[in-house]
Image (spheres, rainbow, N blue to C red):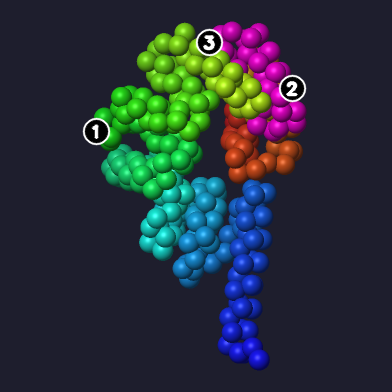
């Protein structure tokens, strides 16, 4: 005969698992506030629930609460690379939105969390990419540096050759070497010909170089590789706006993007709305 205490425990466990699964489904649909309604990060000691809550708080722009929640997640699961990665992302955005007095401290915490995420899992390419961006952009007194970025790019190449080419392209652009940057972006396309993102990266680069016809053709190639993928709409619109071309088409693309089903990996709708406001002179 099953113990009533065991039965109650199993019922509670099943209910929690179901609630967490529904919250994850809401998050995957970019319904971040709905996901948070199903979570209880203040009382929870479940690292999976705290991680999902932290990611949802990050997505709605509450970076301070995201940091607090992810610190609690890390305390419960100190060996989790994804938790440290998201903690770093949250500290990074907190640094960007803080005063000049507090931003350096948040930036240093961002770097430390990224470095810990990579140390915990040397195959966490997402964390390695974000740490690479930090090294690339941050000044030396905050732990940045092009030599560090280049060394990390080599490590990325051991796991994902196409991503390494992209990182080396970013490094070349930073060093004002557009010829090498283009070569590396084309190598990335060759290494992953079925990834539309590689073509998008190349198209955006060509647009920045003023090679608009080539850029347009490369965006069209990306659409053929991944028809109907919303991010192509956003990136094409962004490129048009950045180069001050065909702004009516950019507006149409952004409106279409806002009507598309998005995932957390896509640029947030808030960014698309901001670009539309810019087009309208708002």
Q: First in sequence: mark 2 or mark 3?
A: 3
Residue that badge 3 annotates: 209
Q: Secondary structure at mark 2?
A: helix
278 on left or right of 95: right
Image quadrant where one finds the C terminus: top right
**Residue at left 47%, top 8%?**
179
- Image quadrant in which you'd find residue 167: top left
Instruction: Give the image location of residue 22, x and y in percent.
Output: 66, 61
Q: Can the viewer see residue 247? A: no
**Label 1 neighbour load within 10 Å: few <14, some 14-19, many 20+:** few
Q: Which mark is residue 218?
A: none
239 on left or right of 93: right
Q: Eyeballing the image, is 274 above or below 73?
A: above
Image quadrant where one finds the N terminus: bottom right
**Residue at left 66%, top 16%?**
218
Q: Secondary structure at mark 3?
A: loop
Question: Which secondary structure class fits the magenta region best?
Answer: helix
Q: Eyeballing the image, is 107 above or below 144?
A: below
Q: First in sequence: mark 3 or mark 1?
A: 1
Residue that badge 1 annotates: 141
Question: How far separated are the C-alphas under marks 2 and 1?
Answer: 45 Å
């Amino acid at each position: 005969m099953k113990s009533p205490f065991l039965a109650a425990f199993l019922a509670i466990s099943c209910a929690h698992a179901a609630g967490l699964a529904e919250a994850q489904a809401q998050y995957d649909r970019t319904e971040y506030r709905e996901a948070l309604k199903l979570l209880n990060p203040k009382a929870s000691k479940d690292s999976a629930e705290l991680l999902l809550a932290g990611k949802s708080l990050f997505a709605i722009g509450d970076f301070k609460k995201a940091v607090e929640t992810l610190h609690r997640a890390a305390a419960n699961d100190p060996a989790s690379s994804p938790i440290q990665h998201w903690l770093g992302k949250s500290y990074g955005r907190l640094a960007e939105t803080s005063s000049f007095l507090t931003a350096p401290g948040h930036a240093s915490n961002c770097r430390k969390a990224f470095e810990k995420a990579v140390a915990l899992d040397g195959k966490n390419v997402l964390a390695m990419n974000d740490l690479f961006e930090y090294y690339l952009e941050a000044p030396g007194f905050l732990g940045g540096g092009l030599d560090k970025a280049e060394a990390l790019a080599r490590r990325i190449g051991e796991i994902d050759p196409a991503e390494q080419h992209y990182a080396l392209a970013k490094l070349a652009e930073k060093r004002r070497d557009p010829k090498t940057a283009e070569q590396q972006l084309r190598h990335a396309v060759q290494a992953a010909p079925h990834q539309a993102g590689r073509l998008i990266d190349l198209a955006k680069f060509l647009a920045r170089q003023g090679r608009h016809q080539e850029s347009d053709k490369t965006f069209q190639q990306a659409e053929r590789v991944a028809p109907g993928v919303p991010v192509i709409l956003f990136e094409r619109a962004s490129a048009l706006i950045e180069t001050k071309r065909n702004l009516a088409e950019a507006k149409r693309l952004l409106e279409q993007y806002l009507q598309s089903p998005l995932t957390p990996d896509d640029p947030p709708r808030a960014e698309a709305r901001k670009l539309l406001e810019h087009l309208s002179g708002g």
